[in-house]
Image (spheres, rainbow, N blue to C red):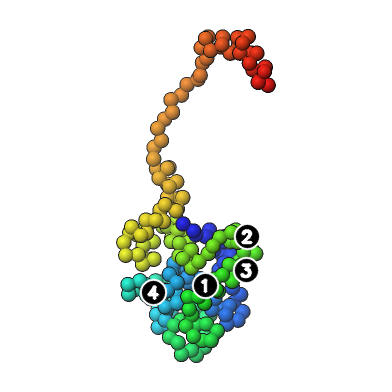
Amino acid sequence: MRHLGKDEIQALLDAPRPIDWPGVRDRAMLHWCFAAGLRLSELTGLRLDDLSLTPQASIVVHGKGRRERCLPLCKVTTVAFRAWLAVRGPVQAPELFVNARREPMTRSGFEYILEKYVRIAGERCPSLNEKRISPHVLRHSCALAILEATKDLRKVSLWLGHVNMQTTEIYTRADLSIKLEALNANTAPHLRSGRFRASDKLIASLTSPSFMRRESRSK
């Protein structure tokens, strides 16, 4: 399963420069795409009225099969959203994220933006240059980060909006820490201690003239 490590994720999230309209927007999109583990359709389908900043910052995500889940926003993501709303300006489109023409962000539009920042982040974190990174790679990275932090597969399933746990179980095969916990929890069998003692017959054969001649020729 393709996913990013912590340093790679941080380098990618730091790539947008929030000094202008596109930079503020792109920073918010990348942060939320990773933090929520969104599918690309979920990201582009977010609407302005899905976002609530008071009393507890949260957003409603519209998943597959018309399923919805409400996710709280962490402080960092809330700051990114507030900054984006401050510069978004009057836009007729109800979607939260829009392109330079003030039209709803498309799948190809976000894929282009992600590719651009992967190249930029690759200058700081060269390992990114060796990976094919798609929006779903960010989703996998989010899932593994939650699993590593909580050790609870049910929380991963709830966060990602999976219908059943079988879909979520693929992450246990990718998370090495889960396997290490299983190894440490298991009581290993004892090895029988002892010291090898060569028999007189073996010693005699190793010191015989014929054996010494063969050893000499092999050198």
Say whether disc 1 or disc 2 marks the residue closer to the N-terminus. 1
Label 4 to label 3, Cα distance in Å? 29 Å
Tell me the amino acid under the disc marked 1: Glu
Name the residue tied to disc 1: 111
Label 1 to label 2, Cα distance in Å? 20 Å
Say whether disc 4 or disc 3 marks the residue closer to the N-terminus. 4
Name the residue tied to disc 2: 126
Label 3 to label 1, Cα distance in Å? 14 Å
CA neighbours of label 4 inside 10 A, class few (<14), some (14 to 19), many (20+): many
At a point 39% along the width and 61% down the height, the residue shown is 156
On the image, the x and y values in percent for residue 172 come to: 40, 53
Say whether disc 3 or disc 1 marks the residue closer to the N-terminus. 1
Q: Quadrant of the C terminus?
A: top right
Is residue 28 toward the left or the right of residue 64 in the image? right
On the image, the x and y values in percent for residue 147 come to: 42, 57
On the image, the x and y values in percent for residue 68 come to: 34, 73
Name the residue tied to disc 3: 120
On the image, the x and y values in percent for residue 69 come to: 35, 72
Whether residue 148 appears in this view of the structure is yes
- Judge by depth and name the residue closer to the eye, 123 or 188: 123
Name the residue tied to disc 4: 61
Whether residue 28 appears in this view of the structure is no
Circle 4: element type: strand
Q: Nearer the viewer, mark 1 or mark 4?
A: 1
- Verify CB contact (< 8 Å) between mark 2 and mark 4: no
At a point 48% along the width and 78% down the height, the residue shown is 106
